[in-house]
Amino acid sequence: MQTQKMKTQPGDALPEDIWKVVFQKLPVNTLLRLRGVCKSWRTIIDSPAFITEHFQHFNENSYKNRLILIERIGHLEWTDQVIRVVNFRLEEIAQITTIGKDCRVWETLNGLFLLQDNDYKPTLIPNLRLYNPYVNKSLDLPPCPLPVLPIDMFVLGFNSSTKDYKVIGFRVKSSKLDELSSEIKVYSCNDRCWKTKNVQMNDAVMYRDILLRDLHQPHFCQGAAHWLVRDVDDLFENTHVLSFDFGREEFRCVELPAESRRMKKFLFIFGKCLAVFCFTAERTDVWIMREDDGERVPQNRWQLSDTKNSSLDACTFNELKNFGIGARVTYDEQCGKLFALRLDFRESNLMSYSIKSQQMENCGRIVDNRIRYADTYVESLVNPLKKSKGD
């Protein structure tokens, strides 16, 4: 009697839990190819739980020193733009997509881009979309409800408790902190709709003299977007950190350490925490913001992580904060260096500063000053078209 051979799938060789462990260590491009091998692998890779686990595991244990650069393809201002992934020596890792000349990048977070397709058109209703170039999926957001005054700031964030990506819109030009109680727009990817919310600033009267007009792109960590802001009377010194919590959907303002008074400052992400680099001609300090403990105004919020005598390179690196559109100071944990992109009329220079040695160096340059945006980047399988499910 002839025994009939049963057909097996590649996914039958090992239990599903073992495949998950293997897949968590693989880059997105490899997983996109593997999902076409068999149905069981595709089910694993497409599941929302695995997408979250892969992002957390792969990007926490892989080589992190990547930048995203958005450059004009040609020399003219009205040419299209190309998105490239490079290392901190400006060596290309991947060229992932091309976007139109009128497209503005508001944010990158967890591999997602928040884009505005009509950046240069005189309209009160921006065309916003979320886009993941690695999986080539995008979600067009419905029109944002019209406020009394046009919105001039959009921010992308993530609420880890509900696995929900959110976009907030508000007005910052010539505004003060206590004016943030009027018409904040919030879009939820899980709910697929905008809502208008009057967000009351905690103890707004205390912070009524905080200016918002100098807000640039925020740093996102611990479920919140963070900016440096200043008092009306302090023209040259940042005095507070303004945060928007995407879980509570509220603003919060925290005063910087008293020891940092009369020091120049900029923010960066240190591990999973927000950090502020402070310096004078005499010393440099690095302060770490402790995680929110649920209090309205947490006590002892700042912890001194590092202090040293200052150097000329520290002063010079701080001047790079005038580095133009869409750039942040970023920190690479492996080498212990801060990075900033210096832009001028002729070329773009990527500069680094070592917190330990206090030395600055030029990592690479791009001529013709074609860079429009620079930020750290991590790849992910996040599909903006799919609704996430909370735990």
Image (cartoon, rainbow, N blue to C red):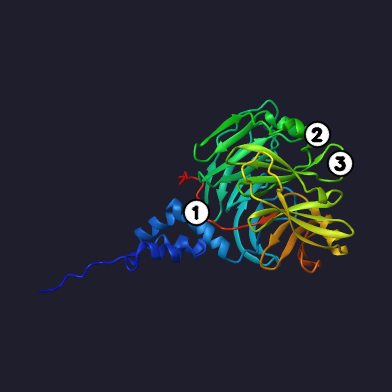
Q: CA distance from mark 2 to mark 3?
A: 10 Å
Quadrant in the picture for the N terminus: bottom left
Q: Horizontal placement of 13 versus 145: left or right?
A: left
Residue 345 picture location, percent across and down: 83, 55
Q: Residue at x 76, y 33 (%)?
A: 206
User: Most extreme residue toward the bottom, as rendered?
Assistant: 1
- Secondary structure under the numbered disc 2 in the rendered image: loop
Q: Which residue is mark 2?
A: 209
Quarter where residue 187 is shown: top right
Q: CA distance from mark 1 to mark 3?
A: 42 Å
Disc 3 target residue? 234
Is any part of residue 319 visible from this angle? yes
Q: Residue furthest front?
A: 299
Q: CA distance from mark 2 to mark 1?
A: 41 Å
Q: Quadrant of residue 155?
A: top right
Kindly identify the amino acid type of the residue bearing the numbered disc 1. Thr
